[in-house]
Image (cartoon, rainbow, N blue to C red):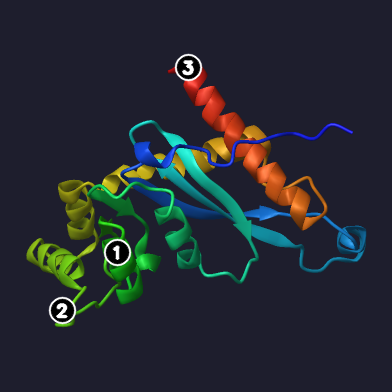
Amino acid sequence: MKTLSLPSALLQRKSVTDIVLDTTGLKVYGAGEWRVKKYGGKRGWRKLHLALEPKSGKLVLAEITGEHTHDTQFLEKALRRTNRRKGHVLFDGIADSHRCYEMAQRYNKRLLTPPKKGAVLRQEKGYEERNDAIKIIHGLGGDRKAKSIWGKLIGYNRRVIIESMVSRWKRLFGASLKSHCEKRRRVEVQLKAWMINTMIEAIA
């Protein structure tokens, strides 16, 4: 019986300096799903975590986890797929924590993420980037428009490319996983990510 051989990494680490991350949900089907359809109830789903290299537009990492896995648990795994040159990591506001800033610095990256509402300046080491963001946003008025201007000033608005990737994934493959067991679901996700990268190469 033939098996499909997929590359061990979607992109070579040496070509990945910056990364952009996002998470979305995918429905899953398995044992007992027919009962949900017939009698109602909560359908199963998984989180799809995507990391993208902004210059090429290709996926660096694509993985699924359980619905209760925190999005930031995916961050370090994505960072391991980057080189050690100075770069940027773009993540949404869920990454606004000391742990995430510290992790990004460990990999020689600058974490660009909007501070949480009501965020205050911190004196502890590792909060320098966050403090700068708070100062800029407050200086621009401290409202939603100020945060949008901050995003344009420092390049955070580039996150739109990962939102487009999530949209492309669902247009191509739908909002669900077809496989019924976890091992095959992981392979399914890797195969779909590889297909997207191949299509990007073909039209480049």
Q: Nearer the viewer, residue 40 or 43?
A: 43
Label ID, residue 106: 1
Query: Type of residue at label 2?
Result: Leu
Q: Which mark is residue 203?
A: 3
* Residue 164 in the image: above or below residue 136: above
Whole-percent x and y of residue 18? 32, 45
Density class for disc 2 (Cα within 10 Å; few <14, some 14-19, many ≥20) is few
**Is 139 situated above or below 169?**
below
**Helix, strand or loop at mark 3:** helix
In this rendering, does residue 176 appear at all?
no
Q: Cα distance, mark 3 to mark 1?
A: 35 Å
Q: Residue 111 falls in which quadrant of the image?
A: bottom left
* Relative image position of residue 114 (x, y in whole percent): 28, 62
Mark 3: amino acid: Ile
* Of 158 and 146, the residue lying toward us: 158
Circle 2 or circle 1, nearest the eye: 1
Q: Secondary structure at mark 2?
A: loop
Q: Residue at x 7, y 65 (%)?
A: 139
Q: Position of residue 25 (x, y in %)?
A: 61, 56
Which comes before the other along the chain, label 2 or label 1? 1
User: In the image, which disc is placed on residue 121?
Assistant: 2
N-terminal label among 3 and 1: 1
Q: Are marks 2 and 1 in contact (CB under 8 Å)?
A: no
Which tag, 3 or 2, sits closer to the chain's start?
2
Decide: is 102 above or below 185.
below
Depth-wise, is mark 3 or mark 1 nearer the camera? 1
Quarter of the picture containing the C terminus is: top left
- Residue most extreme to the top: 203
Residue 100 seen by the camera: yes
User: Horizontal placement of 143 versus 136: left or right?
Assistant: right
